Amino acid sequence: MTDERQGEQHGINTFNEGSLHLALKRWYAQPGDRFEVDVDGSIIDLVRDNLLVEIQTRNFSACKRKLEKLLDHHPVRLVHPIPAERWLIRVEGGRVLSRRKSPRKGQFFHVFNELVRIPGLLPHPNFSLEVLLVRDEEIQQHDGKGSWRRKGWSIADRHLLDVTARYSLASLEDYAALLPDDLPQVFTTQTLAEALGQPRPLMQKMAYCLRMVHLIEAVGKEGRAQLYCRVPIN
């Protein structure tokens, strides 16, 4: 494929809706689903019978108030993609300058980076979450507006390549099941990190969420480390 054809394929999306969001909405849809429906004064990405589906590609804080308003009267499913594989593509003047694979590999547990923003919604009987592991492309353009880490390159758009896995969380039992069976009765976030093979800062966010929904509770300290234990689900 020539650079010119690649430039067209990876052109900058000038619409309000990002390419990744639009592609996920199309991927998720089933026959009979309705798009962009006004429900109680809010525009919903996808409506399936009485289920409202919202696709949030980042920052759960942006949809928190919307979800809070809708959940009292409607079942709502929040769909969130995590890039298990990402290609970084730099485009300038309609031409592709480079394409390389990002060293970062997203995993399911990375959803807790966002769930810490909305832990109070997790126990709501009308709330469910679906996490999608995806392969995508991040299109970058050099406009001087990007972060200092990218040296002036900003993110212009993201394109979906594939969905490789999906995980559903619809009840407190689903969240409780994320704790390993062989976890000690009393544990720290470091213990949890070692058991799940995840970084401790991420497990601290997971512990915060589980504590907020009363699936674990603090039972003391070991040095400076907080000690936790499971709480049975009523």
Image (cartoon, rainbow, N blue to C red):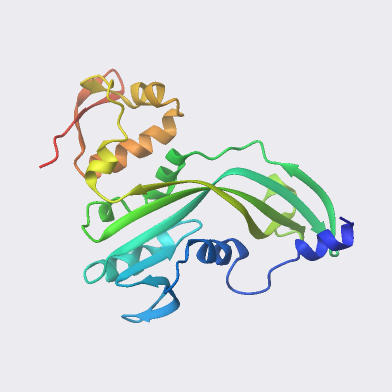
129 over 29 or under it: above or below: above
Residue 146, image x and y in percent?
A: 69, 55
Looking at this view, name the residue that lies furthest to the front: 31
In the depicted structure, whether residue 109 falls above or below residue 193: below
Q: Nearer the viewer, residue 144 or 230?
A: 230
Asked whether, in this view, residue 28 is left or right of residue 211, the answer is: right
What residue appears at the point 25 percent right and 37 percent down from the top-left corner?
Answer: 176
Measuring 20% from the left and 21% from the top, which residue is drawn there? 185
* Quarter occupied by the C terminus: top left
Whether residue 136 can be seen here: yes
- Locate residue 189 relative to residue 93 in the image: left or right: left
Q: Is residue 224 left or right of residue 30?
A: left
Name the quadrant containing residue 113: top left
Q: Position of residue 127 (x, y in %)?
A: 28, 58
Q: Is residue 87 above or below residue 202?
A: below
Q: Residue at x 27, y 56 (%)?
A: 121
Quadrant of the drawing holding the N terminus: bottom right
Q: x, y (%) of residue 56?
A: 46, 60
Residue 92 in view: no
From the top left corner, tell me how far across and down residue 44 is, in percent: 41, 73
Give the total of numbered labels: 0
The picture quadrant where one finds residue 50 is bottom left
Could you tell whether 212 is left or right of 17 in the image?
left
